[in-house]
Amino acid sequence: MFGACALKSVFSVLAHAQFVWGYALPFKRAGEVRVQANGTTYVGNQADAQDVFLGMIHHSSLAIHLTASYGGSFILGESQSYPGYGIVEKSIELGQPVLYVSMNYRLGFFGFPVGEQTMNKGAANLGLYDQRMAIEWVQNNIQHFGGDPTKISGDDFLPSSTSSIIESGKYANIPIISGSNLEEGTWFVAATSTFLDLVEFLNTSLPGLAIGLPPSISSPMCALYPKVLAEGSPYNTGNETFGRGDSYKWAASIVGDYLFTAPRRQFIRAVASRGQKVWSYMFSQPTAGAPPGYGISHTSEIAYVFGGLSSNATQESKDVSDKMMQYWINFATTLNPRPDGSNLPAWPTYGTLKNMVQLRADNYSALLDTFREPATDYILNTILG
């Protein structure tokens, strides 16, 4: 998912198109972009803003390059999260070699300082400037590694809010892959074991927090989710509570939809309505060693996309990773994850039917992106706007 209010995983394919995060890229000094960090997550190691990792392979006519920028609500993350060795090796094996670039940028207070003094000095959102500098470095230097610098250009960097850009349609008209993991909310409600815990979590309005919903808005939202253990997240786990309170699974379902499912639907439905090709997925492959109480949690798919599974991965997980890398490499080189002639499982475009593909070793079936739709429609119409 993309956005400051969520842990975003950005996989920007800089090929046959001119875009970064689906938006036009700048080459003149951009105005100040005001984005608050999400204070609901924990702080990780700070990253060096000048560090750019480039996974290089030698190929005389290479022009396709992939750029990865880690998520983490502007609070945690590092480029090593997406090492890229696996997907580069797979691209060579497929005869579709790619260049892979990942970047670091400043986080937390060092990347996103707050306060009146910061604003007055134009020192806000330094981490976003770091990201832009890294992309400019790619544009200026990628030709030395066989890449095509003309595939990346543009104007102001996020000249207005993300929601207004989506609404106006002022973003690059390029195909998009955007999906969800089965249990997106479990990471974020570990201490939310009672209804009152959830109310406090949703109603918090301290500076810097992404969630600050008044009861008049959050209460009707919560009422749209049945407080039934068998219908909560982690899904398909019956009445199991994983040692947590009876409200944990209910809360995880609500928060997952609020932070991830609804914003994803807002974005891809907007771009699909304008005729852009969109492919969406539901990642539901279990990973060996993952805590059962978190299920198929947020970011679980990253190791599969980049070929970074642990040594104890099951054969089923390895097979899913192999297919996902093929999908993403195809998308980078042809702008279609399953081009004509591919032997990969079918992956229909999202379109007006809201198609998705399930990514699971025993089930690559197509499904509709309509689960819990009344609740996410409320979030879209009442909260996200």
Image (tube, rainbow, N blue to C red):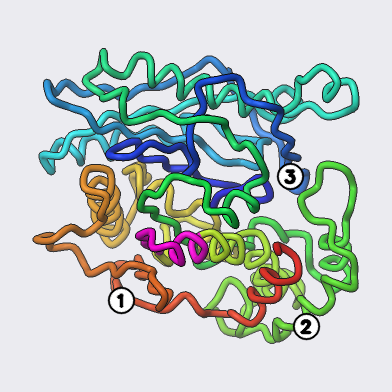
First to last magenta residue range: 268-280
Q: Residues within 10 Å of mark 2 (few under 14, many from 20)?
A: few
Sooner in the amino-acid sequence: mark 2 or mark 3: 3
Give the position of the C terminus as an image quadrant.
bottom right
Occupied quadrant, residue 277: bottom left
Residue 340 position in % (x across, y down): 13, 61
Which structural element holds mark 3?
Answer: loop
Above or below — where is 353 with respect to 332? below
Residue 75 position in % (x across, y down): 68, 36
Sooner in the amino-acid sequence: mark 3 or mark 1: 3
Task: Based on the picture, tell me whether residue 276 belongs to the magenta stretch.
Answer: yes
Q: Nearer the viewer, residue 279 or 57?
A: 279
What type is the residue that disc 3 sits on? Answer: Asn
Q: How many marks?
A: 3
Is residue 46 something one can see in this rendering? no
Residue under the image location 46 percent in, 30 percent down = 154
Q: Nearer the viewer, residue 155 or 58?
A: 155
Separation (CA) of disc 3 from disc 1: 35 Å
Q: Is residue 176 left or right of residue 224?
A: left
Residue under the image location 61 percent in, 85 percent down = 230
Separation (CA) of disc 2 from disc 3: 25 Å
Tell me the residue that label 1 is attached to: 365
Tell me the residue that label 3 is attached to: 38
Which structural element holds mark 1?
Answer: loop
Tell me the residue that label 2 is attached to: 223
Residue 105 position in % (x across, y down): 58, 25
Asked if the residue at tag 1 contacts the one at tag 3, i.e. Cβ–Cβ closer than 8 Å, the answer is no
What type is the residue that disc 1 sits on? Answer: Ser
Which structural element holds mark 2?
Answer: helix
Sooner in the amino-acid sequence: mark 1 or mark 2: 2
Task: Based on the picture, tell me whether residue 68 belongs to the magenta stretch.
Answer: no
